Amino acid sequence: MTDQAVATPAVPRPEAASTTAQIAVLATLAAVGTLATNILLPSLPQMAASLHVSTAEVTASITVFLAVFAIGQLAVGPISDRYGRRVPVLAGFVVFIAGSIWCGLANDLPSLLAGRVIQAAGACSTSVLSRAIARDLFSGAALGRAMALVMIAMAAAPGFSPLLGGALDHWFGWRSEFAFVGAFAAIAAVAYAAVLGETHRSTRIPLNPLAIAKTYFGLTADRRFLVPAATVSLIMGGLFSMFSAAPRVLIEGLQFTPIDLGLFFAATVLVVFGAGMLATRLAPRFGLDRSIQGGLLLAAAGSVALLLVSLFNATFLPFLGAMCVFLLGMGIVNPLGTAQALSPFGEKAGAASALLGFWQMMGAATGVWLAATISHEAMFALGIVLTAASLLALLLYGLRKKAP
């Protein structure tokens, strides 16, 4: 009589564990820039008082960061296509940490802005190359799943960071926020060196300014890149306009406290997380095109609903419901649209990721500016920006059908 087989507990496959670690590190790289962007929001009044300037003046620390963050990506991408990912990423971490120390020691606004320029110059490297590295490691549906998780991290960082920044400011002062982001970057650098390292195995593209310009123009003229990249950038503009307008809507308009605002931002992460998980299931079943179109329809529906709420019933629960629908659509469109924009360009992944990141941050800056200037009524202005961005993205994505 033979011995019965004894069941043994399942153990994770090494390659599965390795993939999980890789995606976790990519998410950390992506989160560095957005964490440093929004963690300061609760502390702007305290920073202004400490530096003897107005709150309006100190908000330049956000604008300067976004501008340098956007432009710097255009240089980082081609550099990584020529010299690989490892050196630019590690150099970016060093620069970011140096900028964080500078900001933490600043005693006047010009010094703070100089530190923010240095910070952004480092952060743009880690953010843009997180997408390029994902393209190096994954393809097809696996790339879509990886980008969904990376985009969740990018949304989670600005969602949770105001709550974290408020707590750090309350207990240790605003300078502790720079100490925190610097320490976070140091840990992320160690994790990157240990888990990923160099991933660029394809042909190295020469670092030539004319060739770089030609590459960017070529990508812009290629509908395979242009349509999904522009679509994602419009939706990203809507997301950042929501982040910038929410304090005015909730604190000034609906009498929320700063802690309530932080909790609201943190709760939005749950919606984005759920949307990202849904995106990973939709893409294999329905394909990228149909899944992205569905996400765009949700984003547009939520945007129009918010505009109607601002006109007829400007209270919290309708506002929350409309924003959740928009965020659900945004959370589907961002990762899948990013994967679709990068997939055809393996040898140009760094440049494609850089150009996409530039467009996203410019979309974010434009959305923030429009939400602040269109109307003194913050909810109405936000409704206008979201509706315009979502409907334009939906119409633009229809051009995808004409792509070769």
Image: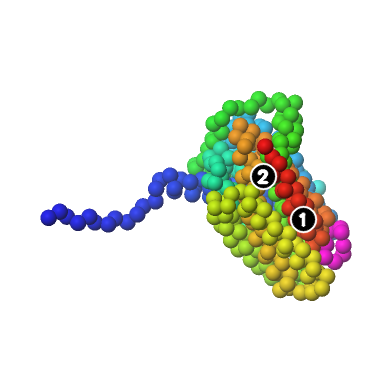
Principal secondary structure, stretch drawn in magenta: helix
Residue 2 position in % (x across, y down)? 15, 54
Q: Residue at x 81, y 47 (%)?
A: 110
Name the amino acid type tagged 1.
Leu
Residue 185 position in % (x across, y down)? 60, 48
- The residue that disc 2 covers is 123
In the image, residue 308 above or below residue 28? below
Name the amino acid type tagged 2.
Ala
Q: Horizontally, is 388 left or right of 320 in the view? A: right
Residue 152 position in % (x across, y down)? 60, 55
- Label 1: element kind: helix
- The residue that disc 1 covers is 391
Q: Residues within 10 Å of mark 2 (few under 14, many from 20)?
A: many
- Label 2: element kind: helix
Residue 172 or residue 298, whichever sits in front: 298
Tell me, yes or no, whether the highlighted magenta stretch contains residue 374: yes
Residue 287 or residue 184, whichever sits in front: 287
Start-end of magenta stretch: 372-381
